[in-house]
């Protein structure tokens, strides 16, 4: 009986992790479970067998949590504010306290970088001022092994030391091209290291990688909402103090923004973690809205490029915008795939995703053709090689995704294969970012 009580206690703790289920709900479910166990034991099963069968008959807890959310929708609004409800919230408050302290540290680091007055170096180092502190929060909450922590700290420190010791050669009124490229690609590399911390060191597990994809999508949505609200408050601040002839621009630029922007980023991360499993997340809904709109945009871009000037004369800024659109497609694909039930049959939206992949691949091929033509005419530069490499990485990703989606829609493959391809390919982007950050500067003489 003591073993049975331990098993029921573990089950109760697991139930309480569902944000839509309160302590009273868990007690009700536990009474139901105990009744089922008692009936099964009376039928001749031992404790272990009775417990396993009873839990099985209780159903999937995610479904149970969703049903509670539907039945008690008014409760969800209360869960969106910081009101402690039970002892299980003590840990959430501790998490928030640690996160606030780390956010303040990140703000101090950003403020220190701004005090140096080097705009180009600020763009290079701002990632080191923010992301390692968020990684420290996940390391504190996930408790990875000391080896994982030491490896992450060592890699981050090595990259930071390397890029800050590189003797970039700036031209008058403009930073070095390789410095700009390193600053643009460095967040990708740091984001992968953050993912390892988020996974608690279990990055090789597909489920952990996919959880990080979901976290990233929700983080973008929450941060955008907080930024919009912050923009409104800033406008009111300037209007109010401007009415009494007080200039607050210096305070906002030198003190408020260095702490507010990292703080909003950290709060968004905490909200994503705290509100997991309360209701259907927002990002999957947005992907269903923006997927057809993105298809129209990409199709229009493809037609405009074919009907316009020769590819060799395509403006560099346009190629950059095309790469940005393709990265948007990648984000839509990743998050919509991460939010889908891999066991569900093929649906219309899956076919729409295949159309998105095909159109994106067509635009990607045009971008690659234009890039090769420009390189053949004028030779290699750091910018061209970085863009060409990114287009190749995107092309391989799109081809693999399209092929696996096609097999799934034809009934010759599973959606799980589509899902696993996404997370297995993510390190390729980080690897290419590492090449641009660490190899390009010396290869192009720091220019």
Image (cartoon, grey):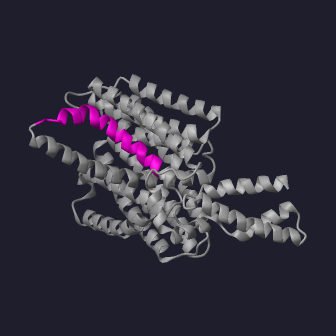
Q: Could you tell me which quadrant the N terminus lies in?
A: bottom right
Q: Nearer the viewer, residue 126 or 282?
A: 282
- Image point (41%, 68%), residue name: 288
**Is 212 drawn above or below residue 167 in the view shown?**
below
Judge left or right: residue 293 versus residue 269: left
User: Looking at the image, which residue sits at the far right?
Assistant: 44
- Could you say which quadrant of the image residue 110 lies in? top left
Q: Residue at x 38, y 40 (%)?
A: 263
Q: Which residues are magenta?
A: 246-271
Total label count? Answer: 0
Q: Which residue is rendered at x = 23% and y = 35% of the image?
A: 253
x, y (%) of residue 135?
50, 38
Residue 69 image position (x, y, % from top left): 53, 67
**Figure quadrant of residue 292:** bottom left
> Which quarter of the rendering shows the C terminus?
top left
Which of the 4 image quarters holds residue 359? Answer: bottom left
Q: Position of residue 24 (x, y in %)?
A: 61, 61
Q: Kindly report the secondary structure that dominates the magenta region of the rendered protein.
A: helix
Q: Nearer the viewer, residue 261 or 374?
A: 261
Left or right for 308, reference 367: left
Task: Indicate whether 187 appears above or below 220.
Answer: above
Q: Is residue 68 left or right of residue 160?
A: right
Instruction: Say which of 278 and 435 sits in front.
Output: 278
- Residue 196 in the image, given as x and y percentages of width and height: 56, 42
Side (left or right) of 292 relative to 214: left
201 lies above or below 45? above
């Amino acid at each position: 009986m003591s073993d049975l009580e331990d098993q029921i206690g573990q089950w109760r703790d697991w139930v309480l992790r569902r944000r839509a289920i309160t302590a009273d709900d868990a007690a009700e479910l536990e009474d139901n479970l105990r009744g089922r166990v008692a009936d099964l034991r009376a039928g001749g099963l031992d404790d272990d067998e009775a417990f396993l069968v009873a839990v099985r008959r209780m159903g999937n807890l995610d479904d149970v949590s969703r049903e509670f959310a539907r039945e008690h929708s008014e409760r969800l609004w209360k869960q969106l504010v910081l009101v402690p409800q039970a002892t299980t919230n003590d840990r959430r408050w501790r998490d928030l306290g640690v996160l606030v302290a780390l956010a303040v540290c990140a703000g101090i680091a950003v403020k220190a970088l701004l005090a140096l007055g080097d705009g180009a170096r600020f763009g290079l180092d701002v990632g080191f001022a923010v992301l390692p502190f968020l990684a420290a929060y996940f390391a504190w909450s996930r408790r990875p092994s000391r080896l994982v922590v030491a490896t992450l700290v060592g890699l981050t420190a090595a990259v930071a030391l390397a890029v800050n010791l590189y003797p970039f050669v700036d031209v008058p009124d403009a930073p070095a091209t390789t410095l700009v490229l390193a600053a643009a690609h460095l967040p990708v590399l740091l984001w992968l290291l953050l993912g390892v911390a988020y996974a608690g060191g279990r990055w090789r597990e597909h489920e952990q990688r996919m959880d990080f994809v979901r976290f990233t999508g929700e983080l973008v949505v929450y941060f955008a909402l907080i930024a919009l609200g912050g923009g409104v408050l800033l406008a009111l601040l300037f209007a109010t103090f401007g009415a009494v002839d007080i200039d607050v621009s210096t305070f906002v630029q030198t003190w408020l923004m260095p702490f507010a922007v990292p703080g909003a980023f950290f709060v968004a991360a905490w909200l994503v973690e705290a509100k997991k499993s309360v209701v259907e997340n927002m990002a999957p809904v947005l992907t269903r809205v923006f997927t057809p709109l993105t298809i129209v945009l990409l199709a229009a871009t493809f037609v405009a490029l074919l009907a316009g000037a020769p590819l060799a004369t395509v403006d560099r800024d346009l190629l950059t915008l095309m790469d940005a659109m393709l990265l948007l497609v990648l984000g839509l694909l990743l998050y919509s795939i991460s939010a889908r039930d891999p066991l569900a049959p093929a649906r219309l939206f899956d076919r729409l995703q295949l159309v998105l992949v095909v159109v994106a691949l067509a635009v990607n091929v045009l971008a690659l053709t234009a890039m090769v033509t420009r390189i053949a005419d004028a030779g290699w530069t750091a910018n061209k090689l970085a863009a060409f490499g990114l287009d190749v990485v995107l092309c391989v990703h799109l081809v693999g995704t399209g092929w696996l989606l096609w097999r799934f829609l034809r009934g010759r493959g599973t959606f799980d294969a589509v899902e696993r391809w996404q997370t297995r390919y993510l390190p390729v982007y980080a690897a290419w970012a590492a090449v641009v950050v660490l190899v390009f500067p010396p290869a192009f003489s720091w220019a």
